[in-house]
Amino acid sequence: MAWFSKPKYTVLASSKKEQQSRNLWTKCDGCGETIYNKEWEENLRVCPKCGHHQRISASDRILLLMDEGTFREEDAYLRTTDPLAFSDSKGPYREKITVTIAKTGLRESVIAGSGRIEGIPVEIAAMDFEFLGGSLGSVAGEKICRTIDRAIRHKRAVIITSCSGGARMHEGIVSLMQMAKTSAWLGKLKAAGLPFISILTHPTTGGVTASYASIGDIIVAEPGALIGFAGARVIEQTIRQKLPEGFQTAEFLVERGFVDLIVPRKEMKSRIAKLLRYLGCKA
Ligand SMILES: [Zn+2]
């Protein structure tokens, strides 16, 4: 699918690292096979050999889900105020943000906006792992809350695609607060009788799993996605027990009811559209 590698809108730029890697071959993280990038693109970055779902950017995620030409980005220019004036051995947080923006071409870890899925108007927020591990900071939290506000205003469903290492340490408690804030905002969405579909992609961990990502009316995951709060090794050391095979994978969690369904990337758009129709959303 040629559209996957050629965005039809120019507001969003895929990360530079991604653009570079598009020129050559990519080694599959699943089976280790080296695959020609054109083949990756045509297969929506799902390994044709083993079915491994390679991570994709927030902008590709939006292209994948939205009807062509319908996406309009909102709140693109929100910037963190660096509430703690944070600095560590690697330097000040402010500098890190500037460097990350230059390096990735992204402005924050969340891209939010409005668009249509098979004609159904929705509000969407997509997380990008390339921006500081897709961490949830004040801007990401605020963008998600504004996405929910717009949905309530226009009576639309909310879709959030998660891909994150968790809360952004550089913003300390202000980052952790976003967990409660986004969850409370989803409470407002529920009170307004509007649905929220949470899409979990590899990896969805930490404070993101422990807040909005886990409280969707419907929780959808991509095959093989790592979904959890603390890392498996930390849990094993804490409880002093060996964890079961496949612990924290989408497949493990769907069997236990934490995830409602696993949807391969190729089917994601049509399945989400179907779910939206089940939930009463109309084109
Ligand atoms: Zn593979």
Image (cartoon, helix red, strand yellow):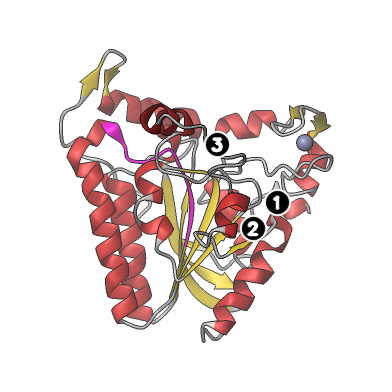
Which residue occupies 39% across, 33% down?
Answer: 239
Query: Who comes first in sequence, dot 1 or dot 2?
Result: 1
Query: Who comes first in sequence, dot 3 or dot 2?
Result: 3
Label 1: few (<14), some or many (≥20) within 10 Å? some
Kind of residue indicated by mark 1: Phe
Residue 4, numbered label: 1
Does the rendering let one see residue 74? no
Which residue occupies 84% across, 39% down?
Answer: 49
Alpha carbons under labels 1 and 2: distance apart: 7 Å
Label 2: few (<14), some or many (≥20) within 10 Å? some
Q: Nearer the viewer, residue 116 or 282?
A: 282
- Which residue, given by chain and number where applicable, does mark 3 sit on? 15
Taking the image as shown, residue 152 lies to the left or right of residue 28, namely left
Q: Residue furthest left?
A: 84
Asked which secondary structure carries label 2, the reply is: helix
Residue 86, numbered label: none
- Where does residue 221 sit, x and y in percent of width and height? 58, 56
- Which residue, given by chain and number where applicable, does mark 2 sit on? 64
Alpha carbons under labels 1 and 3: distance apart: 14 Å
Asked which secondary structure carries label 3, the reply is: loop
Quarter holding residue 131:
top left
Query: Who comes first in sequence, dot 1 or dot 3?
Result: 1
Residue stretch in magenta: 160-169
Which residue occupies 52% across, 53% down?
Answer: 200
Mark 1 touches mark 2? (CB < 8 Å)? yes
Kind of residue indicated by mark 3: Ser
